[in-house]
Image (spheres, rainbow, N blue to C red):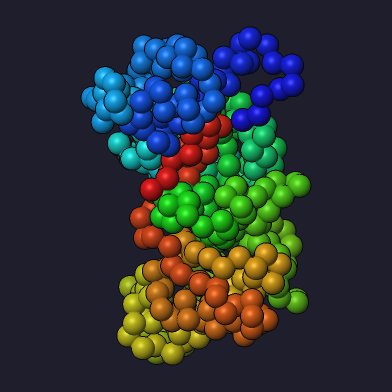
Amino acid sequence: MRLPAKATHQQTRAFNEGLVLRTLYDLGPISRADVARLTGLTRTTVSDVVADLLSNGLAEELGRGPSTGGKSPILVGVVADSRNVVGLDLGEGAFAGALVNLRGDVRLTDEEPVNGPDGGEAIAATYRLIERLLAAAERPILGIGIGAPGVVDTETGVIRWAVRLDWQELPLGRLVSERFGLPTYVANDSRAAAVGEYLFRQGGRIENLVAIKVGTGIGAGIVLGGRAFQGDGHGAGEIGHISVVDDGTLCRCGRFGCLETIASTRAIVVAARVAAAEDPTTALAAPARNGQYPTLDDVRDALEAGDETARWIVVAAGRALGRAIAGLIGTLNVERIVLLGRVTVLGEPWLDAVRDEARRRSLGPLVEHTSIELGSADDDIVMLGSSALLMTRELDLVPRR
Ligand SMILES: [Zn+2]
């Protein structure tokens, strides 16, 4: 938060409020005198602002601290549950939502099934999920943070293009904000996941991180210097539609040979279906005997049973992703790379292929200290990340643990 050169009285007050709130949040329980000392504000200003924060419930008095000579001072801190944020993950198969408090603790979760790429129905499902969460909320709601697939302009809340949901130039942020009368922040889901990983799993202790989410789509979220990097056209990390195969197969985006056509869960399942049709002796053909197609879980089962065809498919997918990661390592030299999403059920054989290929195609000194790890299996990371982005924008608070 930067104070404008010619600040009005109101702006000054808002700035001071933000500064005091952030200090209470980051360092509380803390005395008013210490807040004044640390912020450079006068004790009168701090007392006025704290009085406001106490009356609107954002802060509370938490007993007395040690005396430094005179009367022992009253300590003040932020009330984590004074506000909740609605965090959404417009994921595959289902949209998930949560009520999250100001410390990033999930208070309630809900889900809304979504079938197929019907853009209108996807909007309706988003509304239904938010309606239910708001109805269940027991605390005032600060706002709504949404992690959505595709290219998202976070400044305007416009989804430029989400292939999976068939959304193009959709002003989702404005629609949601107007419908529910709440501040709304929309971010790309991989970017929200990267922020969630950075703040809640790595505790904000590192500077840079890349989180790559692999499901039916593939996207990377990039945190540089502690901030989510957007790119000039809001598409930073959209690696899923980089064309990696010459004369490759048709992608959902209308072009050919995209990374998604070889490394996504959809690509893996399609390859398994083709293999099952060609070779009835492979373990992948087992579901076909019951008239069903192999799923990603069937691929994993076949892999664990030692099926060579399954192994070949999984390794090919892992290698393709590893190639893309080598590009990221060479460009960004980021040493912490976290892999998320459904594909991680494939475990070590897939992860080894990703790592081997990324290392093989990168300059030695660059990969020496690079870790490529599976992220947390918890599937609330996008909801946590999108709610944290909303909190940062609305109150300038950065939750972490
Ligand atoms: Zn594509």
Tell me the residue at 36%/55% (across/down).
378
203 relative position to 139: left or right: right
Query: Residue 175 in the image: x percent, y percent?
Result: 59, 26
Q: Would you place residue 345 above or below residue 213 in this image?
A: below
* Left or right of 113 on screen, residue 68: left
In the image, 76: left or right of 359? Answer: left
Give the image location of residue 294, x and y in percent. 41, 72
Q: Using the image as rendered, state which of residue 174 and residue 20 is in the foreground.
A: 20
Nearer-the-camera pick, 248 or 11: 11
Residue at far front of view: 69
- Tell me, yes or no, if residue 381 can be seen here: no
Relative to 80, does residue 201 appear above or below in the rendering?
A: below
Q: Residue furthest left?
A: 63
**Residue nearest the observer in this picture, 159 or 16:** 16
Q: Position of residue 314 (x, y in %)?
A: 49, 79
Which residue is at a point 36% across and 11% down the rendered structure image? 55
User: In the rendered image, which quarter is residue 304 located in?
Assistant: bottom left
Query: Is residue 212 something one can see in this rendering?
Result: yes
What x and y, as percent, mark residue 13?
57, 14
Which corner quadrant holds the N terminus?
top right
| Total tally of numbered discs in the picture | 0
Vertical side of 387 occupied by 220: above or below: below
Q: Residue at the spot x=47%, y=24% of the render? A: 36
Q: Nearer the viewer, residue 124 or 106?
A: 106
* Quarter holding residue 15: top right
